[in-house]
Amino acid sequence: MIDVDGKKYKLVKDYKDAFNEEEFLSRFTDYFYDYDYIVGDISYGKLRLKGFNLKSSSGFNSINDYSKLEKYLKENCSYDCKYFILKKENV
């Protein structure tokens, strides 16, 4: 479990050992509070974060549809890059 400003996140996937808590916390902002999932991918040595929501979430829109995560990883991230997925608890 990762605690960020009182919000709890569970690491559900850590592909190629991508997750580094210190680096994640340095990139995380309150912008991500409304997302059910946070995906971090590492491209060219830099961590990028993107929020995703479930269709049942009040903040849902098609751009951040969690069901399209595989498509995002394939089309918007470096080939076979390291990445991790965090799930906000109480979703």
Image: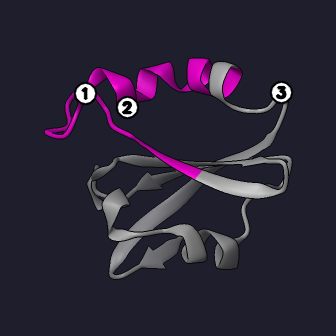
For the point 82% across and 38% down, the residue is 81
Q: Secondary structure at mark 2?
A: helix
User: Residue 54 location, x and y as percent?
Assistant: 31, 32
The kind of residue on which mark 3 rests is Tyr
Q: Residues within 10 Å of mark 3 (few under 14, many from 20)?
A: few
Q: Which residues are magenta?
A: 49-74
Name the residue carrying label 1: 61
Residue 1 forms part of the magenta stretch: no
Name the residue carrying label 3: 79
Name the residue carrying label 2: 64
* Mark nearer the N terminus (2 vs 3): 2
Q: Mark 2 touching mark 3, by CB under 8 A? A: no
Count the labels in the image: 3
For the point 67% across and 79% down, the residue is 22
* Mark nearer the N terminus (3 vs 1): 1
The kind of residue on which mark 1 rests is Asn
In the foreground, 10 or 33: 33
Q: Give the CA distance from mark 2 to mark 1.
A: 6 Å
Q: Mark 2 touching mark 1, by CB under 8 A? A: yes
Look at the picture and state if 7 lies above or below 65.
Answer: below
Q: Give the CA distance from mark 3 to mark 1.
A: 26 Å
On screen, residue 18 versus residue 88, left or right, reads: right
